[in-house]
Image: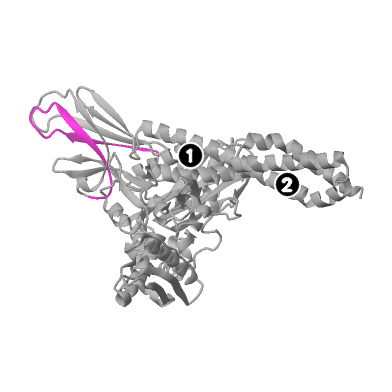
Amino acid sequence: MEYVIGIDLGTTNSCVAVVQNGVPTVLPNRQGYKTTPSMIAMTESKKRLVGHLAKRQSITNAEFTVYAAKRFIGRKWNSEQVRQIVKTTPYRVVEGPHGDVRIELRDRSYAVPEISAMVLAEMKAIAEEYVGQEVQKAVITVPAYFNDNQRQATKDAGTIAGLDVIRIINEPTAAALAYGFGRRFDKQIAVYDLGGGTFDISVLEMSSDGVFKVISTAGDTFLGGEDWDNRVIDWLVEGFSAEHGIDLRSDRMALQRLKDAAEKAKIELSGQRETEVNLPFIITSGRNEALHLQRVMTRADFERLTADLVQRTIDIVSETLDDAGIGKEEIEDVVLVGGMTRVPSVERAVAQLFGREPSKGVHPDEVVALGAAIQGAALVERGNKMILLDVTPHTLGVMVAGGMFEPLIPQNTTVPTSRTRTFTTSRDNQTAVKILVMQGENERAQDNELLGEFILDGLRKANAGSVEIDVTFEINADGIVSVTAKDLETQRDQTIIVAATSGLTKDEIRSMIDEGRRHAVDRKVGEEFEARKQETEQIIIEIEQLFAPVERVVGQSDFGRDALTRARGVVDRARQAILAKDQQQLKEHADSLSRTLRMFKGVVARM
């Protein structure tokens, strides 16, 4: 059976799900958890750690432990968002060769899709262990407000991880699919999705015949739980600085401890009125004096520090409803998605805005992965009648004279779609026109994202304004944008498929795929060795426990002493194979160990 896994690649945590026998299921990792921290680390011996293993050593290995990489994905090094994040990360972030973002770990730098691929590869491994076979196809979710470059970077991460990413879908849409799975009703819902790094709001119409239609979507790809954590960190740093005159951000380990403590405080304040942050030996003063941080934060303190962040989400929701011409009273259910929706001030604000208590019918951490798995199953199952109609989250258009942005496909247009507009040349005897394809909501073209550009040449010479050119934008169901420019008189045309970029070349991606495969093989060999090692060590323990009673029975004869000597030799050689990490030798000694154990047990049984 071919499985398509659904992956929620989150800023803080990631989750993987699959549909088996018509039932969508979230898959536990080896530690038994259904979500895995989106963290990777590189140890001193250059061993790669992912998830819980990376998180456990994050404080002692802060400089080489990466978290919240999703905030960088698809962004340019010179963007304002990147400048902000770099100020507070304990790990090293540098400019890449293509103006992209790279993260330095030990002796080399990694592209952000490469870091994300390590998390996705872990999700793939979790799924394969659960279903008992190799998994290749996946649906991966992204924030609804991600632009094309961020979506492509996510897709590249999946490719590097060894996955065939058959669809990228929006996180709120995935949540709606899981919310409506197995139900038959006509309802208009809002999905409020506040995760670790991003915020989305989507309004959807769900019909009893299995059609999920997105009406409107908006968001902020730089607003999430990390910002709440940073407010707590600021509060702790400023209090410590006032008391001791030391900025804790100057120490990487102290900064990682603060990050860890801020996240814990945020979680605890969702269930209690106050929490104590206690970080002994946080830093050493100039006089070699160990200093401690100890402060009590109340829920009121936390809500005061983060009130403007909550309000930013509410403003986006209100604006989205207004733009779509939808009244709050028309929303029949509000679905909360993302771990941050457990924060009381967030839940309270949403309830107040919509005038109703949000739905408690879905798990905020798991629902997105479930929806992705449901979409994956729908794409490969014959006869599946579920239809998903999504929208383009950003306006698409071209730059025109004066550096202005001329929209062709407005934000929240249902895809697939096609739009055409006629433009005229602006200069005398102009024989070519440059078409700059842009994405964004700003009137000035330079403030929007450049997706691609091409030149339509060979125009007939004419007076200004007399050559008419049709520009057609087309978006297919996968979100691929193609733009065609045509001279209406000569019918000469030029088309570009707008290929979003993650900042990686094809050669770099191929190289990363190869490295990922090598790591997967090494990991498999390592896991097989570990399993055989544990099995061997258990047999050795059992044999050693039987040496004394066996020696009492057979130790008096030459044959018995010789058998004991051979048994000790078998055990010693197995131990040496374990120390040498020689799996082939361990395999060869397995039969000898098993025979020795059976022989010893037989001797003891006759006693």
Relative vertical location of residue 7 with respect to residue 310 in this rendering, above or below? above
- Please state which amino acid type lies under the numbered disc 2: Ile
Q: Position of residue 223 (x, y in %)?
A: 36, 58
Q: Which residue is mark 2?
A: 540
Q: Position of residue 128 (x, y in %)?
A: 60, 41
Mark nearer the viewer, 2 or 1: 2
Q: Which residue is mark 1?
A: 161
- Please state which amino acid type lies under the numbered disc 1: Ala
Q: Is residue 154 left or right of residue 483?
A: right
Residue sitting at x 29%, y 57%: 84
Q: Position of residue 245 (x, y in %)?
A: 29, 73
Relative vertical location of residue 301 with respect to residue 117 in this rendering, above or below? below
Quadrant of the image for the N terminus?
top right
Residue sitting at x 81%, y 52%: 548
Residue sitting at x 86%, y 38%: 559
Crowding around mark 1 (Cα neighbors within 10 Å: few <14, some 14 to 19, many 20+) is: many
Q: Is residue 387 visible?
A: no
Closer-to-camera residue (496/152): 152
Q: Is residue 456 visible?
A: yes
Query: Which secondary structure, mark 1?
Result: loop
Q: Is residue 485 left or right of residue 428?
A: right
Asked whether residue 430 is drawn in magenta, I would say yes
Crowding around mark 2 (Cα neighbors within 10 Å: few <14, some 14 to 19, many 20+) is: many
- Name, please, the residue furthest toward the right: 606
Asked whether residue 573 is drawn in magenta, I would say no
The magenta segment: 416-442
Query: Which secondary structure, mark 2?
Result: helix
